[in-house]
Amino acid sequence: MRLILTLILVLAGFAAQKAEAGPGAPPPFWQREWPKTDFATTSVKNWNEILSGGPPRDGIPALAAAAFKPVGEESEIGGREPVITLEMEGERPRAYPIRYLIWHEIVNDTVGDVPIIVTFCPLCNSALVFERRLNGEVLNFGVTGKLRNSDMIMFDRESESWWQQALGEGIVGRHTAARLRQVPSWLESWDEFRARNPDGLVMVTPEHSRDYGANPYAGYDSAARPFLFNGELPPNGVPALMRVLRVGNRAWPMDRLAREGEIREAGLVISWKAGQASALDSRRIAEARDVGTIRVRDEQGRDVRHDMLFAFAFHAFFPEGEWMLGE
């Protein structure tokens, strides 16, 4: 079970050593690999923060589009398997199964007349949806193969700017400091999605040779430390790989959410219930331990933009963030 993770770590460490950069400039071969990227325009203060994760550019193949079928026609997804749910007004609800995103990390899609990007970074458990229209231009995204704070760095094919997935923010190139607009979405089980949306749509199995339904990071969310991360671990005794709910710059640890069931604070109504499998536990996602489903709404019942990432990633990207630990 640990063999795949060990190989990933060895390959990534080897790649990172070869790609080591000084704090003031990226390595020259990055510039040869990315001739359209404006490396002189960046918010990155120290290039050593960026590591090569092993796969090269597009080595993890982002999906340029997705096909869908009615919920009732799907029979292969396990009932507890996680999906990213997208419910946009006037459109049929859509489910993007993590069994596909764990292998592809990005789906470029269009819902109605809104171009979106559906993303999942396995190493920090961040599952986010953004609009991919920026200043009137529709961007198409791929996976760089590079990581910062163990989080996927994406790129747009139009300018080859680099983007931090957990933030939806440009960090290298022409779009540095630009922000993609996050679209409300959430992780829930396949059973939960289809029970609520019998007329909904679910993403069709991609036409790639992958063991869909398998977890190539078996045992990862039980590890003591994250991979490819040398930053400071979370404060307050929060385990590095505990899931935390992030809303803005606040984080609620999953153990508190599971213990209390419902929390009303900071203008939010946060609920937890059992029934969703971890995507990063056992070899088969459908057989993984239960981590539960979180829903986040405001006091008027509207869904709130949020993320369910690991604690170390929250602390890395929001070092001054507020930890909502309760009593």
Image (cartoon, rainbow, N blue to C red):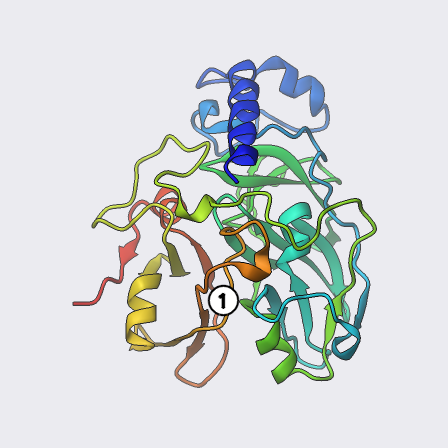
Instruction: Give the camera-side residue of 275 and 153.
Output: 275
Q: Give how far across and how far down residue 112 sits, in percent.
A: 77, 71
In this orientation, does residue 206 appear? yes
Q: Give how far across and how far down residue 262 sits, in percent.
A: 33, 78
Q: Give how far across and how far down residue 250 sits, in percent.
A: 33, 59
Residue at image location 71% in from the left, 34% down from the top: 59
Q: Give how far across and how far down residue 180 sits, in percent.
A: 59, 54
Q: Quick one: quadrant of the C terminus?
A: bottom left
Question: With 99 as the anchor, is 151 left or right in this view?
Answer: left
Q: Is residue 308 above or below residue 8?
A: below
Which residue is tagged 1? 305
The local crowd at label 1, few if under 14, some if 14 to 19, many if 20 or more residues have their Cα within 10 Å, is some
Report helix, strand or loop for mark 1: loop
Instruction: Give the camera-side residue of 289 and 320.
Output: 289
Question: With 21 as the anchor, is 81 left or right in this view?
Answer: right
Residue at image location 56% in from the left, 14% down from the top: 18
Residue at image location 21% in from the left, 67% down from the top: 326
In this orientation, does residue 181 appear? no
